[in-house]
């Protein structure tokens, strides 16, 4: 899955847990998605379970989240 698709999927999954008007709902969902991806990156760095390429892909998803 491409970074852009993954970012959209993640944001829209979080939207169902962010009760607010549509604009705030999207903002909150994006923030939750970024927290999630940052947590994955930190976990990967701490435990070394992924490659640098995987971390690069996580960072691409972070950039795409901002573009939604």
Image (spheres, grey):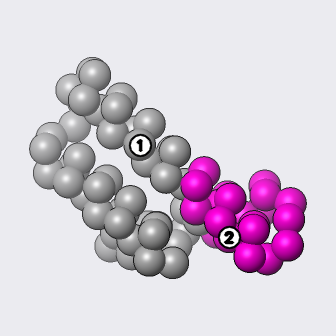
Residue tagged 1: 38
* Magenta-colored stretch includes residue 19: yes
* Farthest residue, direction top: 47
Q: Is residue 9 left or right of residue 15?
A: left
Mark closest to the chain's N terminus, 1 or 2: 2
In the displayed structure, 34 sits above or below 23; it is above
- Residue 2 appears in the rendering: yes
Q: Measuring from the top left, give residue 12's x and y in whole percent.
A: 64, 69
At a point 13% along the width and 44% down the height, the residue shown is: 52
Alpha carbon of mark 1 to alpha carbon of mark 2: how far?
A: 18 Å
Q: Which region shows up in magenta?
A: 12-32
- State which quarter of the image contains the N terminus: bottom left
Residue 31 locus on image (x, y percent): 58, 55
Q: Quadrant of residue 48?
A: top left
Considering depth in this image, is 63 or 54 the residue closer to the camera?
A: 63
Residue that carries the numbered disc 2 in the rendered image:
26
Circle 2 SS class: helix
Q: Point out residue 7 in the picture as x, y percentages from the top left corner.
A: 46, 67
Q: Nearer the viewer, residue 2 or 30?
A: 30
Q: Which residue is at 41% across, 43% downward?
A: 38
Quick one: label 1, few (<14), some, or many (20+) residues within 10 Å?
some
Whether residue 13 is visible: no
Quadrant assignment, res 28: bottom right
Q: Main secondary structure of the magenta part?
A: helix
Please tell me whether residue 64 belongs to the stretch shown in magenta. Answer: no
Pick the front one: 64 or 44: 64
């Amino acid at each position: 899955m491409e970074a852009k698709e993954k970012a959209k999927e993640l944001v829209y999954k979080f939207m169902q847990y962010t009760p607010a008007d549509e604009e705030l709902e999207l903002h909150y969902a994006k923030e939750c998605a970024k927290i999630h991806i940052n947590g994955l990156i930190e976990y990967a760095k701490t435990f070394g379970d992924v490659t640098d390429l995987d971390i690069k892909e996580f960072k691409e998803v972070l950039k795409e989240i901002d573009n939604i």
